[in-house]
Protein backbone atom coordinates (compact mmCIF):
# COMPACT_ATOMS: atom_id res chain seq x y z
CA UNK A 1 0.00 0.00 0.00
CA UNK A 2 2.87 2.37 0.77
CA UNK A 3 4.13 2.11 -2.81
CA UNK A 4 1.00 3.71 -4.30
CA UNK A 5 1.36 7.13 -2.61
CA UNK A 6 5.02 7.19 -3.63
CA UNK A 7 4.13 6.30 -7.21
CA UNK A 8 1.40 8.95 -7.22
CA UNK A 9 3.85 11.53 -5.89
CA UNK A 10 6.39 10.60 -8.58
CA UNK A 11 3.83 10.91 -11.40
CA UNK A 12 2.51 14.19 -10.00
CA UNK A 13 6.03 15.62 -9.74
CA UNK A 14 6.75 14.82 -13.38
CA UNK A 15 3.46 16.33 -14.52
CA UNK A 16 4.33 19.55 -12.72
CA UNK A 17 7.77 19.56 -14.31
CA UNK A 18 6.19 18.97 -17.74
CA UNK A 19 3.81 21.89 -17.21
CA UNK A 20 6.27 24.25 -15.51
CA UNK A 21 9.80 23.13 -16.40
CA UNK A 22 12.60 24.37 -14.17
CA UNK A 23 16.11 24.97 -15.47
CA UNK A 24 19.09 26.23 -13.51
CA UNK A 25 21.58 28.55 -15.20
CA UNK A 26 24.51 30.56 -13.87
CA UNK A 27 22.22 33.36 -12.63
CA UNK A 28 19.62 31.20 -10.89
CA UNK A 29 16.57 29.01 -11.54
CA UNK A 30 14.05 29.69 -14.34
CA UNK A 31 10.48 28.47 -14.61
CA UNK A 32 9.37 28.03 -18.22
CA UNK A 33 6.27 26.66 -19.90
CA UNK A 34 5.29 24.08 -22.54
CA UNK A 35 4.25 25.08 -26.07
CA UNK A 36 3.09 23.33 -29.24
CA UNK A 37 4.88 23.55 -32.56
CA UNK A 38 2.97 23.66 -35.84
CA UNK A 39 3.04 19.86 -36.07
CA UNK A 40 1.51 19.51 -32.62
CA UNK A 41 4.71 18.48 -30.87
CA UNK A 42 5.71 19.82 -27.47
CA UNK A 43 8.60 22.18 -26.86
CA UNK A 44 9.51 24.44 -23.95
CA UNK A 45 9.85 28.19 -23.70
CA UNK A 46 11.81 30.40 -21.32
CA UNK A 47 11.10 34.07 -21.94
CA UNK A 48 12.47 37.38 -20.70
CA UNK A 49 15.79 36.09 -19.38
CA UNK A 50 18.04 39.06 -18.48
CA UNK A 51 21.51 38.94 -20.00
CA UNK A 52 22.55 42.51 -19.14
CA UNK A 53 21.82 45.07 -16.46
CA UNK A 54 19.15 47.63 -17.41
CA UNK A 55 20.99 50.25 -19.55
CA UNK A 56 19.44 53.23 -17.77
CA UNK A 57 20.79 56.27 -15.94
CA UNK A 58 24.56 56.47 -16.27
CA UNK A 59 24.53 53.25 -18.33
CA UNK A 60 22.48 54.85 -21.14
CA UNK A 61 24.57 54.76 -24.37
CA UNK A 62 27.33 52.68 -22.71
CA UNK A 63 28.47 49.13 -23.39
CA UNK A 64 26.33 46.59 -21.53
CA UNK A 65 27.20 45.04 -18.17
CA UNK A 66 26.29 41.39 -17.47
CA UNK A 67 23.05 40.89 -15.57
CA UNK A 68 23.00 39.98 -11.91
CA UNK A 69 21.61 36.73 -10.59
CA UNK A 70 18.48 36.25 -8.49
CA UNK A 71 17.22 34.34 -5.50
CA UNK A 72 14.46 31.77 -5.80
CA UNK A 73 12.71 30.88 -9.04
CA UNK A 74 12.39 33.49 -11.81
CA UNK A 75 9.17 33.48 -13.84
CA UNK A 76 10.25 32.96 -17.46
CA UNK A 77 6.73 32.70 -18.86
CA UNK A 78 6.03 36.41 -19.42
CA UNK A 79 6.34 38.19 -22.76
CA UNK A 80 9.71 39.78 -23.39
CA UNK A 81 9.79 43.62 -23.12
CA UNK A 82 10.73 45.33 -26.38
CA UNK A 83 13.33 48.07 -26.71
CA UNK A 84 12.52 51.78 -26.94
CA UNK A 85 11.74 52.67 -30.53
CA UNK A 86 9.52 54.41 -33.00
CA UNK A 87 8.09 52.94 -36.16
CA UNK A 88 6.33 49.92 -34.68
CA UNK A 89 3.28 49.80 -36.92
CA UNK A 90 2.73 53.56 -36.89
CA UNK A 91 5.97 55.30 -37.96
CA UNK A 92 5.15 58.21 -35.66
CA UNK A 93 4.52 56.02 -32.62
CA UNK A 94 6.90 55.82 -29.68
CA UNK A 95 6.97 52.67 -27.59
CA UNK A 96 9.03 50.16 -25.68
CA UNK A 97 11.32 50.47 -22.70
CA UNK A 98 15.02 51.05 -22.13
CA UNK A 99 15.06 48.10 -19.73
CA UNK A 100 14.94 45.60 -22.59
CA UNK A 101 18.12 43.53 -22.60
CA UNK A 102 16.46 40.15 -22.37
CA UNK A 103 16.33 37.04 -24.50
CA UNK A 104 14.07 34.04 -25.10
CA UNK A 105 15.13 30.40 -25.27
CA UNK A 106 13.08 27.57 -26.80
CA UNK A 107 14.12 23.93 -26.60
CA UNK A 108 12.50 20.77 -28.00
CA UNK A 109 13.19 18.76 -24.87
CA UNK A 110 14.43 19.32 -21.37
CA UNK A 111 18.04 18.28 -20.86
CA UNK A 112 18.94 15.01 -19.22
CA UNK A 113 21.88 12.64 -19.14
CA UNK A 114 20.50 10.83 -22.20
CA UNK A 115 19.84 13.88 -24.39
CA UNK A 116 22.39 14.72 -27.09
CA UNK A 117 23.34 18.40 -27.19
CA UNK A 118 21.47 20.18 -29.96
CA UNK A 119 22.56 22.81 -32.49
CA UNK A 120 21.71 26.35 -31.42
CA UNK A 121 20.15 29.07 -33.61
CA UNK A 122 20.44 32.63 -32.28
CA UNK A 123 18.04 35.05 -33.98
CA UNK A 124 18.82 38.78 -34.35
CA UNK A 125 15.73 40.71 -35.47
CA UNK A 126 15.59 43.33 -38.19
CA UNK A 127 14.02 46.77 -38.29
CA UNK A 128 16.62 49.18 -39.66
CA UNK A 129 18.41 49.35 -36.29
CA UNK A 130 15.62 51.62 -35.05
CA UNK A 131 12.66 49.24 -34.62
CA UNK A 132 11.67 45.59 -34.35
CA UNK A 133 11.47 42.92 -31.68
CA UNK A 134 11.21 39.19 -31.02
CA UNK A 135 7.74 39.45 -29.48
CA UNK A 136 5.66 36.33 -30.07
CA UNK A 137 3.42 38.25 -32.48
CA UNK A 138 6.44 38.83 -34.76
CA UNK A 139 8.80 35.92 -34.10
CA UNK A 140 6.74 32.97 -32.95
CA UNK A 141 8.99 29.89 -32.72
CA UNK A 142 6.38 27.33 -33.82
CA UNK A 143 7.88 26.72 -37.30
CA UNK A 144 11.53 26.36 -36.31
CA UNK A 145 10.69 24.23 -33.28
CA UNK A 146 9.46 21.41 -35.51
CA UNK A 147 13.19 20.64 -35.81
CA UNK A 148 15.71 19.33 -33.31
CA UNK A 149 17.41 22.65 -32.51
CA UNK A 150 17.51 25.11 -29.63
CA UNK A 151 16.31 28.60 -30.61
CA UNK A 152 17.41 31.82 -28.91
CA UNK A 153 15.90 35.21 -29.79
CA UNK A 154 17.48 38.38 -28.44
CA UNK A 155 16.68 42.03 -27.92
CA UNK A 156 19.29 44.76 -28.28
CA UNK A 157 19.18 48.54 -27.95
CA UNK A 158 17.91 50.38 -31.00
CA UNK A 159 18.16 53.84 -32.51
CA UNK A 160 19.76 56.55 -30.41
CA UNK A 161 19.87 54.28 -27.37
CA UNK A 162 22.01 51.70 -29.15
CA UNK A 163 24.00 53.67 -31.68
CA UNK A 164 24.84 57.17 -30.44
CA UNK A 165 28.56 57.90 -30.42
CA UNK A 166 30.98 60.66 -29.46
CA UNK A 167 34.55 60.85 -30.76
CA UNK A 168 35.92 62.11 -27.43
CA UNK A 169 37.35 58.98 -25.75
CA UNK A 170 36.92 60.52 -22.29
CA UNK A 171 33.14 60.24 -22.65
CA UNK A 172 33.37 56.46 -23.09
CA UNK A 173 30.55 56.47 -25.66
CA UNK A 174 32.37 55.28 -28.81
CA UNK A 175 29.16 53.84 -30.29
CA UNK A 176 27.81 50.42 -31.22
CA UNK A 177 26.26 49.79 -27.80
CA UNK A 178 23.51 47.85 -29.60
CA UNK A 179 26.07 45.60 -31.28
CA UNK A 180 27.85 45.11 -27.96
CA UNK A 181 24.49 44.07 -26.51
CA UNK A 182 24.39 41.35 -29.16
CA UNK A 183 27.94 40.29 -28.27
CA UNK A 184 27.05 40.02 -24.59
CA UNK A 185 23.94 38.01 -25.50
CA UNK A 186 26.14 35.62 -27.52
CA UNK A 187 28.48 35.29 -24.55
CA UNK A 188 25.45 34.48 -22.38
CA UNK A 189 24.41 31.80 -24.88
CA UNK A 190 27.91 30.34 -24.93
CA UNK A 191 27.92 30.13 -21.12
CA UNK A 192 24.35 28.98 -20.46
CA UNK A 193 22.86 27.20 -23.46
CA UNK A 194 24.00 23.75 -22.36
CA UNK A 195 21.48 23.99 -19.50
CA UNK A 196 18.74 24.08 -22.16
CA UNK A 197 20.15 21.13 -24.09
CA UNK A 198 22.07 23.27 -26.58
CA UNK A 199 25.59 22.73 -27.88
CA UNK A 200 27.82 25.74 -27.07
CA UNK A 201 30.21 24.60 -29.79
CA UNK A 202 27.57 24.55 -32.54
CA UNK A 203 25.98 28.00 -32.64
CA UNK A 204 24.44 29.59 -35.74
CA UNK A 205 23.68 33.31 -35.71
CA UNK A 206 20.95 34.40 -38.11
CA UNK A 207 18.92 37.48 -38.78
CA UNK A 208 16.86 39.35 -41.34
CA UNK A 209 17.41 42.85 -42.72
CA UNK A 210 19.28 44.84 -40.03
CA UNK A 211 19.64 41.51 -38.23
CA UNK A 212 21.40 40.12 -41.31
CA UNK A 213 23.67 43.18 -41.41
CA UNK A 214 24.39 42.48 -37.73
CA UNK A 215 25.28 38.87 -38.53
CA UNK A 216 27.77 40.03 -41.16
CA UNK A 217 29.22 42.62 -38.78
CA UNK A 218 29.82 39.89 -36.20
CA UNK A 219 31.83 38.09 -38.87
CA UNK A 220 33.89 41.28 -39.24
CA UNK A 221 34.33 42.01 -35.51
CA UNK A 222 37.15 40.66 -33.32
CA UNK A 223 34.83 41.18 -30.35
CA UNK A 224 32.65 38.32 -31.64
CA UNK A 225 35.47 35.85 -32.27
CA UNK A 226 34.69 32.37 -30.97
CA UNK A 227 31.06 33.12 -30.15
CA UNK A 228 29.48 31.41 -33.18
CA UNK A 229 30.22 28.67 -35.68
CA UNK A 230 27.98 29.48 -38.67
CA UNK A 231 26.25 32.59 -40.03
CA UNK A 232 22.99 33.07 -41.95
CA UNK A 233 21.97 36.46 -43.34
CA UNK A 234 18.46 37.04 -44.70
CA UNK A 235 18.46 40.15 -46.93
CA UNK A 236 21.38 42.09 -45.59
CA UNK A 237 25.17 42.42 -45.49
CA UNK A 238 27.46 44.97 -43.89
CA UNK A 239 28.51 46.48 -47.24
CA UNK A 240 25.06 47.81 -48.11
CA UNK A 241 25.61 51.44 -49.21
CA UNK A 242 25.18 54.03 -46.45
CA UNK A 243 24.19 51.45 -43.81
CA UNK A 244 26.83 52.68 -41.37
CA UNK A 245 26.14 55.70 -39.18
CA UNK A 246 28.41 58.71 -38.93
CA UNK A 247 30.89 59.56 -36.22
CA UNK A 248 29.88 62.03 -33.52
CA UNK A 249 26.17 61.64 -34.23
CA UNK A 250 25.55 62.49 -30.57
CA UNK A 251 26.15 66.11 -31.52
CA UNK A 252 23.46 65.92 -34.20
CA UNK A 253 21.01 64.58 -31.63
CA UNK A 254 21.97 67.29 -29.13
CA UNK A 255 21.45 70.01 -31.74
CA UNK A 256 18.02 68.64 -32.65
CA UNK A 257 17.08 68.69 -28.97
CA UNK A 258 18.27 72.29 -28.57
CA UNK A 259 21.05 71.49 -26.11
CA UNK A 260 23.16 74.65 -26.13
CA UNK A 261 26.27 73.81 -24.10
CA UNK A 262 29.57 73.25 -25.91
CA UNK A 263 30.91 71.17 -23.04
CA UNK A 264 30.63 67.57 -24.23
CA UNK A 265 30.47 66.15 -20.72
CA UNK A 266 27.51 68.41 -19.97
CA UNK A 267 25.92 67.51 -23.31
CA UNK A 268 26.13 63.82 -22.47
CA UNK A 269 24.73 64.43 -18.99
CA UNK A 270 21.72 66.24 -20.44
CA UNK A 271 21.13 63.46 -22.98
CA UNK A 272 21.21 60.90 -20.18
CA UNK A 273 18.79 62.91 -18.05
CA UNK A 274 16.13 63.53 -20.71
CA UNK A 275 13.10 61.21 -20.94
CA UNK A 276 13.64 58.49 -23.53
CA UNK A 277 10.53 59.58 -25.45
CA UNK A 278 12.15 62.95 -26.17
CA UNK A 279 15.22 61.27 -27.63
CA UNK A 280 13.08 59.01 -29.82
CA UNK A 281 11.02 61.92 -31.12
CA UNK A 282 14.17 63.85 -31.99
CA UNK A 283 15.53 60.79 -33.78
CA UNK A 284 12.29 60.51 -35.75
CA UNK A 285 12.75 64.07 -37.07
CA UNK A 286 16.41 63.52 -37.96
CA UNK A 287 15.65 60.27 -39.74
CA UNK A 288 13.40 62.01 -42.26
CA UNK A 289 16.58 63.28 -43.93
CA UNK A 290 19.18 60.82 -42.60
CA UNK A 291 17.74 57.30 -42.62
CA UNK A 292 20.70 55.49 -41.02
CA UNK A 293 21.42 58.31 -38.57
CA UNK A 294 21.65 55.92 -35.61
CA UNK A 295 23.18 52.65 -36.79
CA UNK A 296 26.45 50.75 -36.41
CA UNK A 297 29.53 52.88 -37.01
CA UNK A 298 33.30 52.71 -37.24
CA UNK A 299 34.51 53.53 -33.76
CA UNK A 300 37.08 56.13 -32.86
CA UNK A 301 39.89 54.99 -30.56
CA UNK A 302 38.64 54.69 -26.99
CA UNK A 303 39.44 53.14 -23.63
CA UNK A 304 37.37 50.07 -24.40
CA UNK A 305 37.59 47.38 -27.06
CA UNK A 306 36.11 48.39 -30.41
CA UNK A 307 33.38 46.39 -32.05
CA UNK A 308 34.21 47.83 -35.49
CA UNK A 309 37.47 49.65 -36.13
CA UNK A 310 37.51 49.75 -39.96
CA UNK A 311 35.21 49.63 -42.97
CA UNK A 312 33.59 46.20 -43.35
CA UNK A 313 34.67 46.00 -46.99
CA UNK A 314 38.32 46.54 -46.02
CA UNK A 315 38.11 43.89 -43.29
CA UNK A 316 36.46 41.47 -45.71
CA UNK A 317 39.06 42.04 -48.43
CA UNK A 318 41.88 41.55 -45.92
CA UNK A 319 40.61 38.11 -44.94
CA UNK A 320 41.16 38.97 -41.28
CA UNK A 321 37.68 38.20 -40.00
CA UNK A 322 35.69 35.41 -38.36
CA UNK A 323 35.62 32.83 -41.14
CA UNK A 324 32.70 30.41 -40.83
CA UNK A 325 30.25 28.68 -43.19
CA UNK A 326 27.95 31.43 -44.49
CA UNK A 327 24.48 31.29 -46.03
CA UNK A 328 22.91 34.48 -47.37
CA UNK A 329 20.28 35.59 -49.84
CA UNK A 330 17.78 38.11 -51.09
CA UNK A 331 14.21 38.43 -52.30
CA UNK A 332 13.34 39.50 -55.83
CA UNK A 333 11.34 42.62 -54.82
CA UNK A 334 13.60 44.00 -52.09
CA UNK A 335 13.11 47.49 -53.54
CA UNK A 336 9.46 47.58 -52.49
CA UNK A 337 10.88 48.58 -49.10
CA UNK A 338 11.64 52.02 -50.54
CA UNK A 339 8.09 52.39 -51.83
CA UNK A 340 6.93 51.88 -48.24
CA UNK A 341 9.43 54.48 -47.04
CA UNK A 342 8.32 57.01 -49.66
CA UNK A 343 4.67 56.47 -48.79
CA UNK A 344 5.32 56.94 -45.07
CA UNK A 345 7.43 60.08 -45.44
CA UNK A 346 5.88 61.85 -48.46
CA UNK A 347 2.48 60.23 -48.88
CA UNK A 348 3.37 59.56 -52.54
CA UNK A 349 4.85 56.70 -54.54
CA UNK A 350 8.57 56.84 -55.16
CA UNK A 351 9.99 58.85 -58.01
CA UNK A 352 13.72 58.80 -58.71
CA UNK A 353 14.93 62.22 -59.80
CA UNK A 354 18.60 62.16 -58.79
CA UNK A 355 20.54 59.13 -59.95
CA UNK A 356 23.75 60.28 -58.26
CA UNK A 357 22.32 58.83 -55.03
CA UNK A 358 22.89 55.40 -56.57
CA UNK A 359 26.63 55.88 -56.88
CA UNK A 360 28.10 53.94 -53.95
CA UNK A 361 30.31 55.95 -51.60
CA UNK A 362 33.06 53.35 -51.67
CA UNK A 363 33.70 54.17 -55.34
CA UNK A 364 35.03 57.52 -54.07
CA UNK A 365 33.77 59.50 -57.06
CA UNK A 366 33.95 63.24 -56.50
CA UNK A 367 30.54 64.93 -56.10
CA UNK A 368 29.73 67.25 -58.97
CA UNK A 369 32.38 65.77 -61.23
CA UNK A 370 31.91 64.82 -64.87
CA UNK A 371 32.64 61.26 -63.80
CA UNK A 372 29.68 61.37 -61.42
CA UNK A 373 27.38 62.81 -64.08
CA UNK A 374 28.36 60.18 -66.64
CA UNK A 375 27.96 57.27 -64.22
CA UNK A 376 24.58 58.45 -62.97
CA UNK A 377 23.37 58.71 -66.57
CA UNK A 378 24.67 55.20 -67.24
CA UNK A 379 22.69 53.86 -64.28
CA UNK A 380 19.55 55.66 -65.40
CA UNK A 381 19.80 54.29 -68.94
CA UNK A 382 20.35 50.73 -67.72
CA UNK A 383 17.15 50.70 -65.66
CA UNK A 384 14.94 53.09 -67.64
CA UNK A 385 16.24 52.98 -71.20
CA UNK A 386 14.85 55.91 -73.15
CA UNK A 387 11.92 56.52 -70.76
CA UNK A 388 11.74 58.98 -67.90
CA UNK A 389 11.04 57.86 -64.31
CA UNK A 390 7.34 57.89 -63.48
CA UNK A 391 5.15 57.08 -60.49
CA UNK A 392 2.94 55.15 -62.92
CA UNK A 393 5.60 52.49 -63.55
CA UNK A 394 7.43 51.52 -60.37
CA UNK A 395 9.19 48.37 -61.56
CA UNK A 396 12.40 50.07 -62.81
CA UNK A 397 12.73 51.86 -59.47
CA UNK A 398 12.01 48.66 -57.55
CA UNK A 399 14.67 46.83 -59.56
CA UNK A 400 17.20 49.62 -59.07
CA UNK A 401 16.69 49.80 -55.31
CA UNK A 402 16.72 46.00 -55.10
CA UNK A 403 20.07 45.75 -56.86
CA UNK A 404 21.71 48.78 -55.25
CA UNK A 405 20.77 48.05 -51.64
CA UNK A 406 20.50 44.27 -51.50
CA UNK A 407 21.16 42.06 -54.52
CA UNK A 408 24.54 43.39 -55.60
CA UNK A 409 25.96 43.83 -52.07
CA UNK A 410 24.94 40.21 -51.40
CA UNK A 411 26.44 39.04 -54.70
CA UNK A 412 29.63 40.97 -54.04
CA UNK A 413 29.95 39.74 -50.45
CA UNK A 414 29.55 36.12 -51.54
CA UNK A 415 32.26 36.45 -54.19
CA UNK A 416 34.68 38.22 -51.86
CA UNK A 417 34.19 35.67 -49.09
CA UNK A 418 35.06 32.69 -51.27
CA UNK A 419 38.36 34.40 -52.13
CA UNK A 420 39.47 34.67 -48.51
CA UNK A 421 37.63 31.96 -46.56
CA UNK A 422 38.03 28.17 -46.79
CA UNK A 423 34.42 27.68 -45.71
CA UNK A 424 31.44 27.30 -48.07
CA UNK A 425 29.21 30.21 -49.02
CA UNK A 426 25.61 29.39 -50.00
CA UNK A 427 23.27 31.88 -51.69
CA UNK A 428 19.49 31.76 -52.12
CA UNK A 429 17.03 33.80 -54.19
CA UNK A 430 13.51 33.94 -52.75
CA UNK A 431 10.50 34.73 -55.00
CA UNK A 432 7.65 32.89 -53.26
CA UNK A 433 4.36 34.80 -53.20
CA UNK A 434 1.48 33.50 -51.06
CA UNK A 435 -0.71 34.68 -48.21
CA UNK A 436 2.25 34.12 -45.86
CA UNK A 437 4.31 36.94 -47.39
CA UNK A 438 4.74 39.11 -44.29
CA UNK A 439 5.02 42.63 -45.73
CA UNK A 440 2.30 42.03 -48.31
CA UNK A 441 0.02 40.82 -45.52
CA UNK A 442 0.55 44.17 -43.80
CA UNK A 443 0.28 46.21 -47.00
CA UNK A 444 -2.21 44.51 -49.36
CA UNK A 445 -1.58 47.14 -52.06
CA UNK A 446 1.82 45.52 -52.64
CA UNK A 447 0.15 42.33 -53.87
CA UNK A 448 -0.07 43.91 -57.33
CA UNK A 449 3.67 43.17 -57.65
CA UNK A 450 4.31 39.42 -58.11
CA UNK A 451 7.19 38.17 -56.00
CA UNK A 452 8.65 38.64 -52.53
CA UNK A 453 9.16 42.07 -50.98
CA UNK A 454 11.79 42.87 -48.39
CA UNK A 455 11.00 40.93 -45.18
CA UNK A 456 8.26 38.86 -46.87
CA UNK A 457 10.28 35.74 -46.03
CA UNK A 458 9.67 36.36 -42.30
CA UNK A 459 6.24 34.79 -42.74
CA UNK A 460 7.88 31.47 -43.67
CA UNK A 461 10.44 31.47 -40.85
CA UNK A 462 8.27 32.59 -37.93
CA UNK A 463 4.65 32.37 -36.94
CA UNK A 464 3.31 35.92 -36.59
CA UNK A 465 0.10 37.66 -35.70
CA UNK A 466 -0.68 37.68 -39.43
CA UNK A 467 -0.18 33.93 -39.98
CA UNK A 468 -3.42 32.30 -41.21
CA UNK A 469 -4.20 28.61 -40.74
CA UNK A 470 -1.88 26.58 -42.99
CA UNK A 471 -3.33 23.43 -44.53
CA UNK A 472 -1.06 20.39 -44.70
CA UNK A 473 0.13 19.91 -48.27
CA UNK A 474 -0.76 23.46 -49.32
CA UNK A 475 1.67 25.66 -51.23
CA UNK A 476 2.28 27.65 -48.05
CA UNK A 477 2.97 24.48 -46.05
CA UNK A 478 5.50 23.24 -48.60
CA UNK A 479 7.38 26.55 -48.72
CA UNK A 480 7.54 26.77 -44.92
CA UNK A 481 8.92 23.25 -44.80
CA UNK A 482 11.49 24.06 -47.49
CA UNK A 483 12.72 27.22 -45.76
CA UNK A 484 12.80 25.69 -42.28
CA UNK A 485 14.52 22.54 -43.56
CA UNK A 486 17.18 24.55 -45.40
CA UNK A 487 17.92 26.86 -42.50
CA UNK A 488 17.93 24.19 -39.80
CA UNK A 489 19.96 21.82 -41.99
CA UNK A 490 22.54 24.57 -42.26
CA UNK A 491 22.50 24.99 -38.48
CA UNK A 492 22.89 21.25 -37.93
CA UNK A 493 25.19 20.19 -40.77
CA UNK A 494 26.65 23.39 -42.24
CA UNK A 495 24.91 22.38 -45.48
CA UNK A 496 21.32 23.41 -46.39
CA UNK A 497 20.75 20.26 -48.48
CA UNK A 498 22.57 17.29 -46.97
CA UNK A 499 19.88 15.15 -48.66
CA UNK A 500 17.34 15.61 -51.47
CA UNK A 501 14.46 16.78 -49.26
CA UNK A 502 14.35 20.18 -51.00
CA UNK A 503 14.13 18.60 -54.45
CA UNK A 504 17.55 19.77 -55.63
CA UNK A 505 21.13 19.97 -54.42
CA UNK A 506 22.13 23.43 -53.18
CA UNK A 507 25.71 24.01 -54.31
CA UNK A 508 27.99 26.62 -52.74
CA UNK A 509 29.33 29.55 -54.74
CA UNK A 510 32.49 28.62 -56.62
CA UNK A 511 35.19 30.67 -58.26
CA UNK A 512 33.81 31.27 -61.75
CA UNK A 513 30.37 29.80 -61.01
CA UNK A 514 27.84 31.78 -59.00
CA UNK A 515 25.66 28.92 -57.77
CA UNK A 516 22.46 29.80 -55.95
CA UNK A 517 19.23 28.14 -54.85
CA UNK A 518 15.89 29.51 -56.03
CA UNK A 519 12.95 29.16 -53.63
CA UNK A 520 9.80 29.89 -55.59
CA UNK A 521 6.07 29.62 -55.06
CA UNK A 522 5.63 26.21 -56.64
CA UNK A 523 9.14 24.75 -56.82
CA UNK A 524 12.75 24.97 -55.71
CA UNK A 525 15.66 24.63 -58.08
CA UNK A 526 19.42 24.98 -58.17
CA UNK A 527 20.64 27.55 -60.65
CA UNK A 528 23.57 29.79 -61.59
CA UNK A 529 24.14 33.53 -62.10
CA UNK A 530 21.43 35.21 -60.01
CA UNK A 531 19.97 38.32 -61.73
CA UNK A 532 22.82 37.88 -64.19
CA UNK A 533 22.51 40.96 -66.40
CA UNK A 534 21.98 43.30 -63.46
CA UNK A 535 24.80 41.81 -61.39
CA UNK A 536 27.20 42.03 -64.32
CA UNK A 537 26.25 45.68 -64.81
CA UNK A 538 27.23 46.56 -61.23
CA UNK A 539 30.25 44.26 -61.27
CA UNK A 540 31.56 46.14 -64.31
CA UNK A 541 31.09 49.47 -62.53
CA UNK A 542 33.07 48.22 -59.55
CA UNK A 543 35.72 46.80 -61.86
CA UNK A 544 36.15 50.25 -63.39
CA UNK A 545 35.84 52.48 -60.34
CA UNK A 546 36.46 50.67 -57.05
CA UNK A 547 39.81 51.75 -55.55
CA UNK A 548 41.41 48.58 -54.16
CA UNK A 549 43.86 49.61 -51.47
Image: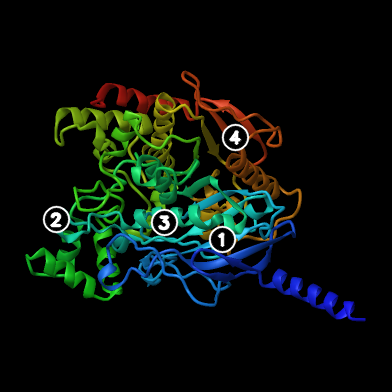
The residue carrying mark 1 is 105
Query: CA–CA distance between discs 4 and 1?
Result: 24 Å
The reply to whether dot 4 and dot 1 touch (C-beta < 8 Å) is no
Q: Is residue 238 above or below residue 65?
A: above
The residue carrying mark 3 is 127
The reply to whether dot 4 and dot 3 touch (C-beta < 8 Å) is no
Indicate the secondary structure of the residue bearing disc 3: loop
Question: Residue 57 appears in which quarter of the rendering?
Answer: bottom left
x and y, in percent, of residue 267 in the image: 14, 67
The residue carrying mark 4 is 495
Q: Nearer the viewer, mark 4 or mark 3?
A: 4
Dot 4 or dot 1, earlier in sequence? 1
Question: Residue 407 appears in which quarter of the rendering?
Answer: top left
Dot 1 or dot 2, earlier in sequence? 1
Q: Taking 407 as reference, is 277 left or right? A: left
Q: Taking 365 as reference, is 500 left or right? A: right
Report how many numbered discs are placed on residues in the image. 4
x and y, in percent, of residue 120 in the image: 57, 49
Query: CA–CA distance between discs 2 and 4?
Result: 45 Å
Q: Is residue 154 above or below residue 258?
A: above
Give neighbour class at mark 2: few <14, some 14-19, many 20+ (Cα, 10 Å).
some
Residue drawn at x 70%, y 49% is: 477
Inspect this view and state whether residue 503 appears.
Answer: yes
The reply to whether dot 1 and dot 3 touch (C-beta < 8 Å) is no
Dot 1 or dot 3, earlier in sequence? 1
Residue drawn at x 65%, y 55% is: 145
Which of these two is toward me, 524 or 134? 134
Query: CA–CA distance between discs 2 and 3?
Result: 29 Å
Question: Residue 76 appears in which quarter of the rendering?
Answer: bottom right
The residue carrying mark 2 is 168
Amino acid sequence: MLHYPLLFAFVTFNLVIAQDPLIEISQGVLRGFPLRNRDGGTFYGFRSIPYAQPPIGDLRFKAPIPADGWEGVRDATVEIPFCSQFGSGDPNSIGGTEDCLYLNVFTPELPSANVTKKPVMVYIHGGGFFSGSVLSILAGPEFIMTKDVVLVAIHYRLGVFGFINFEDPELEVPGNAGMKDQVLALKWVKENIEAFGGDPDNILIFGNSAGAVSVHLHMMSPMSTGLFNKALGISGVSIIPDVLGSKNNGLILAEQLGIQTTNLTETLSVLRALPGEELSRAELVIQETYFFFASPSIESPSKEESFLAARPIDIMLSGDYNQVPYLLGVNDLEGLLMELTYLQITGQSMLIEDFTEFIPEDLEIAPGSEEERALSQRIKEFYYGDTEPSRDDLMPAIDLYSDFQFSFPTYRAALEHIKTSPYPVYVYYFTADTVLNFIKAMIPEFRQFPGAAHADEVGYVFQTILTPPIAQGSVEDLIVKSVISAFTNFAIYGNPTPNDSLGAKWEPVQDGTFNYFHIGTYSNNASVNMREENMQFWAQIYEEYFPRK
